[in-house]
Amino acid sequence: MKSFVKVINHIKEVRLAKKITQIQMAEDLQITRQTINAIEKNKYNPSLELALKLAKYLDVPFEQLFYLEEKE
Amino acid sequence: MKSFVKVINHIKEVRLAKKITQIQMAEDLQITRQTINAIEKNKYNPSLELALKLAKYLDVPFEQLFYLEEKE
DNA sequence: ATTAAATGTAAAGATATCTTTACATTTAAT
DNA sequence: ATTAAATGTAAAGATATCTTTACATTTAAT
C-alpha cells in the first residue's frame, strides 16, 4: 500500500501521563515490551487489533490516540 | 499475538448504505478490490493505516466501524 | 558513584497484510 | 434468457507486524 499519509500515535505521551512502564503495559496487554517500544519509536504501526486494545487500555478515544497525517 | 478478542468491522454495511461498489471504493482508496473483499469477508483485518483511511472515506466514527469483541 | 529498573536495539523466524494475475460465480438490468 | 457489472476466490510473492533471545544504554533512586 503506497501511501502519502502516515499514522501518528500518542502512546508514549499517554502512557507517561499515566505513569505506566512499557514493561507493565506489555504484561497487561499480553504482548512483548519490544513491541511497545517499537511502536512508540515509530518502527512500525500496531495491528488494528493491538491498536484497539491500546486505546481501551489507555482509556482514550481511538481517534485521539491514532490519526492520519500528510507524510513529510 | 495470541488473543481472545477479535476485530469486528462494519465496512460492508456502511458501504452498501452509501451505494458504493467495492471497485469504486478500492479505486478511491488506491488499494485493490481484492483487499476490500478480503476485509469484508473477514479473511484478515485492515492495517491500522488502511482502517483509518476507511473510516475517513466512509465518514463514520472509527469506533463505530471497528471494535473488539470476545472471540467465540 | 553505585545499583537496579527501564528503555533502546538487533537479528532471526513466524504470521498477517496487501498486490498481481487469473478465473469463477452471483447479481442486476434489459 | 442474455449480458455486463459486481463479487468471490486462489496462489505466489512482497512487505509489515510481532515474538524470542540477547545485550547495550539511559534514567532514577540511594
Image (cartoon, coloured by chain):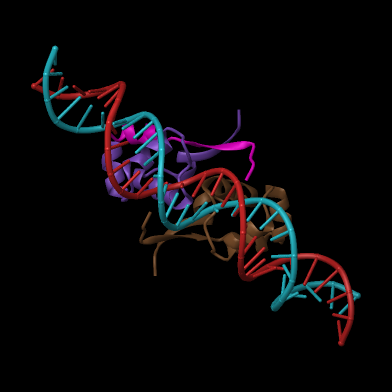
Chain colours: A brown, B purple, C red, D cyan
Vertical placement of B70 versus A15: above or below? above
C12 or B1, nearer to the observer? C12
The quadrant where residue A4 appears: bottom left
From where the camera sits, is residue A20 visible?
A: no
The quadrant where residue A33 appears: bottom right
Q: Position of residue B59 (x, y in %)?
A: 36, 45
Q: Position of residue B20 (x, y in %)?
A: 28, 37
B17 or A46, nearer to the observer? A46
Label count reads 0
For the point 31% across and 44% down, the residue is: B26
Whether residue B12 is in magenta: the answer is yes
Lateral position of residue C3 relative to residue A30, left or right = right
Residues in magenta? B1-19
The quadrant where residue A32 appears: bottom right
From where the camera sits, is residue A52 visible?
A: yes
Lateral position of residue B35 relative to residue D26, left or right = left
For the point 42% across and 32% down, the residue is: B41
Q: Position of residue D11 (x, y in %)?
A: 41, 38
For the point 63% across and 52% down, the residue is: A58
Quarter of the rendering occupied by the C terminus of chain B: top right
For the point 72% across and 61% down, the residue is: A21
Lateral position of residue A24 relative to residue C24, left or right = right
Q: Position of residue B70 (x, y in %)?
A: 61, 33
Lateral position of residue B14 relative to residue A36, left or right = left
Vertical placement of A36 versus D1: above or below? below
